[in-house]
Image: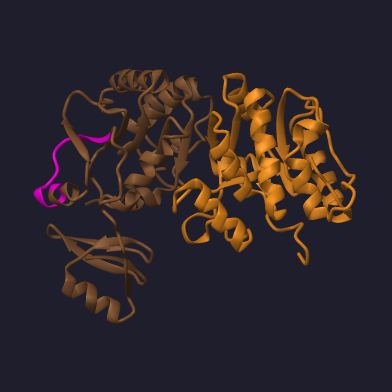
Chain colours: A brown, B orange
């Protein structure tokens, strides 16, 4: 049952304690949901998983996902998915969500994300509001990145959740991102993506990091 | 820079002196005359969204009067030289604080227009913009969106960007409220 939290809660997911904040939308068992709703700790969320996904859209997933999550995604009508390992990143659909499943997905935002691509070429959340390019990666990679983006005091994007409309600019973005990922062994993917963004300059819609549930691990 | 009213003009003098120390060769346009029939708050937003009407620069750094520049601004201009249309920072107000300072109707309309319940609020008190057809269309849209509620301009900016998306480079907080450009948020509000 889907609920929106009013207070802070911790939920066990696959044996790990995951903490959630007020406002977070989560799916829990019916008994627990009703208990929290009765206590005023949550409100029921009406989540229409049959909301029309753009028919040409799909999720490209980097790596595998567990069965429970796969079952949950299967309830989204018309959702197409493909799974990739070494051939990453890719744009298999006209509107692709490039997803690295390391965090709890926000199914409520899935359709909204695809619809943003009617205006923008790319929509991607920020990593957070504090971390700058100057704070991550190796010294060598930071120095190289600075030669491209000119100043490292810029925010990073969360490359685990990128909505992209397939077009010449985003094809070039993905190709450039691939090149930049290969440039440094053990490189930081966020810096590679940042360099690709600066070089290609797609029309981007930056999003808040709530889109990745604030980056919490699954 | 826009400085309507004595408080804003005092702040703008401080801002210009700081700017002259750090970027002595950077020409500055400052508007101090409020458009007829508008309050200072309305006039400043009206003028900001009509930036290209009162400045002839091809690449413009817009600074609120309550900012103080501490370091060179070349990075922002370089992003424009490299092909971006607009460079600015995300707001510190996100999540529960998203658009808290705009009117209820303005906020509701912004989220409806965006078609999205969770959007990134941008900070429009400091930005770098290149004059071109895309940004001129964006600013025309910003002006018309602002005119719907005539309040703050950040909701209007998001709605305008949905109408006219441009190539944006996000800068980090040091460029608006940090080491490069300090921002005395709220200093010029009524009662501050």
Horizontally, is B187 left or right of B95 in the view? right
Q: Residue at x 26, y 25 (%)?
A: A90
B4 or A50: nearer the viewer:
A50
Q: Position of residue A106 (x, y in %)?
A: 30, 51
Q: Position of residue A173 (x, y in %)?
A: 38, 22
- Asked if one can make out residue A188 in the rendered structure from this viewpoint, the answer is no
A37 or B121: nearer the viewer:
A37
Q: Residue at x 75, y 47 (%)?
A: B45
Magenta residue check for A149: no
Q: Residue at x 59, y 38 (%)?
A: B88
Query: Please, is residue A157 above or below residue B60 in the view?
Result: below
- Asked if one can make out residue A181 in the rendered structure from this viewpoint, the answer is yes
Q: Quadrant of residue A96?
A: top left
Q: Position of residue B129 (x, y in %)?
A: 66, 30
* The N terminus of chain B, quarter of image: top right
**Residue situated furthest left in the rendering:** A67
Horizontally, is A39 left or right of A191 in the view? left
Which residues lie in the magenta part? A57-70
* The C terminus of chain B, quarter of image: bottom right
């Amino acid at each position: 049952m889907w609920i929106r939290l009013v207070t802070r809660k911790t939920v066990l997911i696959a044996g790990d304690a995951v903490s959630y904040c007020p406002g977070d939308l989560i799916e829990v068992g019916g008994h627990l949901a009703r208990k929290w709703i009765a206590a005023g700790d949550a409100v029921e969320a009406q989540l229409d998983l049959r909301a029309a996904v753009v028919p040409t859209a799909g999720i490209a997933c980097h790596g595998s996902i567990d069965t429970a999550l796969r079952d949950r995604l299967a309830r989204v009508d018309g959702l197409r998915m493909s799974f990739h390992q070494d051939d990453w990143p890719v744009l298999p659909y006209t509107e692709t969500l490039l997803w690295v499943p390391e965090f709890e997905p926000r199914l409520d935002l899935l359709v909204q994300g695809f619809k943003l691509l009617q205006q923008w070429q790319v929509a991607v959340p920020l990593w957070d509001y504090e971390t700058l390019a100057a704070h991550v990666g190796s010294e060598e990679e930071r120095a190289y990145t600075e030669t491209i983006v000119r100043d490292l005091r810029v925010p990073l994007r969360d490359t685990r959740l990128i909505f992209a409309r397939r077009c010449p600019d985003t094809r070039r973005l993905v190709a450039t991102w691939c090149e930049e990922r290969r440039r440094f062994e053990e490189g930081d993917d966020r810096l590679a993506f940042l360099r690709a963004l600066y070089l290609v300059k797609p029309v981007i819609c930056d999003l808040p990091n709530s889109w990745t549930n604030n980056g919490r691990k699954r | 820079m826009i400085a309507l009213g004595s408080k804003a003009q005092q702040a703008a003098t401080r801002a210009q002196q700081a700017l002259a120390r750090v970027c002595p060769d950077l020409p500055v346009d400052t508007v101090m005359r409020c458009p007829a029939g508008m309050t200072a708050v309305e006039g400043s937003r009206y003028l900001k969204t009509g930036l290209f009407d009162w400045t002839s620069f091809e690449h413009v750094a817009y600074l609120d009067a309550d900012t103080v520049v501490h370091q060179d601004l070349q990075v922002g201009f370089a992003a424009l030289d490299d092909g971006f249309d607009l460079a600015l920072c995300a707001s510190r107000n996100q999540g529960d604080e998203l658009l808290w300072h705009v009117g209820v109707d303005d906020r509701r309309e912004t989220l409806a227009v965006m078609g999205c319940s969770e959007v990134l609020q941008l900070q429009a008190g400091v930005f770098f913009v290149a004059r071109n057809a895309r940004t001129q269309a964006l600013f025309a849209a910003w002006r018309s969106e602002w005119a719907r509620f005539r309040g703050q301009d950040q909701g209007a900016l998001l709605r305008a960007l949905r109408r006219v998306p441009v190539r944006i480079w996000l800068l980090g907080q040091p460029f608006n409220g940090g080491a490069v450009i300090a921002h005395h948020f709220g200093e010029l509000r009524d009662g501050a």
